[in-house]
Image: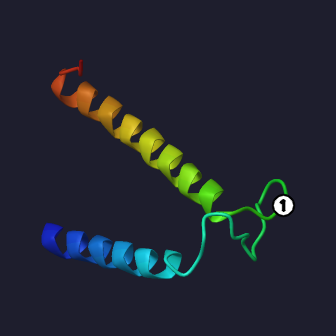
Amino acid sequence: TWQEALGTWQAEIEKSRHNAARFGLDDVTVGKHRRTGERFNLRWLYTHMIEEYARHNGHADLIRERIDGATGD
């Protein structure tokens, strides 16, 4: 159900916040970037996730516009 999906998503957010609180923004990851092979910091990761959310929200908005014809300001 929608409520179950929302609850799962919110639980994952809480786990992520708990884990992220253990690190500073400039702490470097153990894993490496898939394309560059370089390590990155939490600050880069947060910025990347904001960009990804924005990109996918834009995609969803385009789909919605095709369905209902309404455009934003």
Q: Residue at x 85, y 61 (%)?
A: 37
- Most foreground residue, 2 or 53: 53
Residue 1 in picture, x, y percent from top left: 15, 72
6 relative position to 3: left or right: right
- Most foreground residue, 42 or 58: 42
Residue 15 in picture, x, y percent from top left: 40, 81
Q: Quadrant of residue 46?
A: bottom right
Please say if 22 is above or below 52: below
- Most foreground residue, 73 or 43: 43
How is the model colour-coded? Answer: rainbow
Residue 68 in picture, x, y percent from top left: 16, 27
Task: Determine which residue is flagged by label 1.
Answer: 38
28 relative position to 6: left or right: right
Question: Looking at numbered disc 1 in the image, what kind of residue is underneath it?
Answer: Glu
- Most foreground residue, 40 or 61: 40
Q: Residue at x 21, y 30 (%)?
A: 67
Please say if 16 is above or below 70: below
68 relative position to 42: left or right: left
